[in-house]
Amino acid sequence: MLNIFEVNETNHMIEQEKLDVRTITMGISLLDCCDNDLEKVNEKIYNKITKLAEKLVSTGQDIEQEYGIPIVNKRISVTPIALVGGSCCKTSEDFVTIAKTLDCAAKTVGVNFIGGYSALVSKGMTTADRLLIESIPEALAATERVCSSVNVGSTKTGMNMDAICLMGEIVRKTAELTKENDSLGCAKLVVFCNAPDDNPFMAGAFHGVTEADAIINVGVSGPGVVKTALEEVRGKNFEELCEKIKKTAFKITRVGQLVAQEASRRLNIPFGIIDLSLAPTPAVGDSVAEILEEIGLEMVGAPGTTAALAMLNDQVKKGGVMASSYVGGLSGAFIPVSEDQGMIEAAACGALTLEKLEAMTCVCSVGLDMIAIPGDTKATTIAGIIADEAAIGMVNQKTTAVRIIPVIGKGVGETVEFGGLLGYAPIMPVNQKDCSAFVTRGGRIPAPIHSFKN
């Protein structure tokens, strides 16, 4: 039972410390929409999404009003489209028609993003996988709400270097086709290693083939809550610091559990997971970087940053797991540069470099996220960055990802404005030494020895 103190404490977290439910994401299986006729596939996809998600947005708004809990986004994830369109799509242009159908369905039901324009190619690419991947630049340029992801590696299968090399080119082409909007299309494209089936956060959400026909996943965020809580243990030892983080994460997750159960009951769709991720926004006071600075760093990027982030991530997970039996997705701390005011400031003054961010991704939830780089960066260099990040995920048995934006026409020292939750970012320098002979070798990098556990 909740007591009045806990109710007041939660209200304070919402009103003063920017606690929110970042997203309710409805996962929808489109496997039953497969057909040899492309027109029928598009019709089935549109009808299924608009029927199941018809009340998703209104239900979220009702829960917001009744409980006073801000729910920032209502979203949809679908079965990887490379699987759905495999039998009917003969060209990359055919896949683009499905992207437009997804976009239309998302607009009809009122969600802000729909994820799942995806391919899973950690071991190899089918013809459909390659066609979908080749269609990504045009698909993201022609739609507003569609998000795309490609899984290029896993601990069990190793890394598909053919796919990684191709994705370097795809990121470049996406940047070129959306250069009128500062290459914004790349903000809707994620390259994964060990992608989870139940991630509710964009741009990497898709509805895994292991999931039910439809599911409700909720992502909760509260960097401001954690930062404020840690002010109470300033100067205390690590034991007290860790206890405070765990207890705070527990409270945040309970809010998400309430919203998830209510949404599930009202929509009559099973509850999947709670993703407790400290996902920042550009707003002052809603920053993971500020948490790390409260822990004792002068600025994020200083020596000790990776250790502080490792501790934060671990304690968040421990607190979250105690609060819900179904914690999943990514769960931990995100470090998207453009979406975190503290990260933006550290990157702008040179305290935070691409290499330091890569080191930090070894211990955080995702990877190199929302990083703006010079628009003339070569495709092979981008592929090398993706390969480095995928290797971290493969060897450490964790999810890693790259969402990197080569901003066409801009260089180091300039700033790019994305707007909204995507924020703004300084263009960060990239190592210019050539890696093309490495990334173009072809084939797969084998799985690490510790992957053999059967």
Image (cartoon, rainbow, N blue to C red):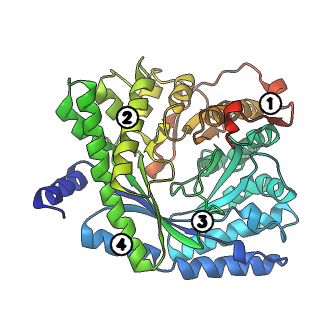
Classed neighbour count for the residue bearing mark 4: other residues with Cα under 10 Å, few (<14), some (14–19), many (≥20): some
User: Where 243 sits versus 347, above or below?
Assistant: below
The amino acid at mark 2 is Leu
Who comes first in sequence, dot 2 or dot 1?
A: 2
Amino acid type at mark 4: Glu
The residue closer to the viewer here, 264 or 382, is 264
Residue 263 rendering spot, x and y as whole percentages: 40, 72
Tell me the tag on residue 439. Answer: 1
The image quadrant that residue 6 belongs to is bottom left
Callout 2: helix, strand or loop? Answer: helix
> What residue is disc 3 on?
211
Name the secondary structure under disc 1: helix
Q: Residue at x 41, y 37 (%)?
A: 313
Mark 1: few/some/many CA within 10 Å (<14, 14-19, 20+): many
* Image location (x, y in percent) of residue 301: 44, 23
| Depicted 272 relative to depicted 277: above or below | below
**Amino acid carrying mark 1 in the image:** Val
Q: Earlier in the sequence, mark 3 or mark 2?
A: 3
Instruction: For marks 3 and 2, give the CA distance.
Output: 30 Å
Looking at the rendered structure, the kind of residue marked 3 is: Glu
Pointer 4 residue: 262
How packed mark 3 is, by other alpha carbons closer than 10 Å (few <14, some 14-19, many 20 or more), is: some
> Distance from label 1 to label 3 (Cα)?
34 Å
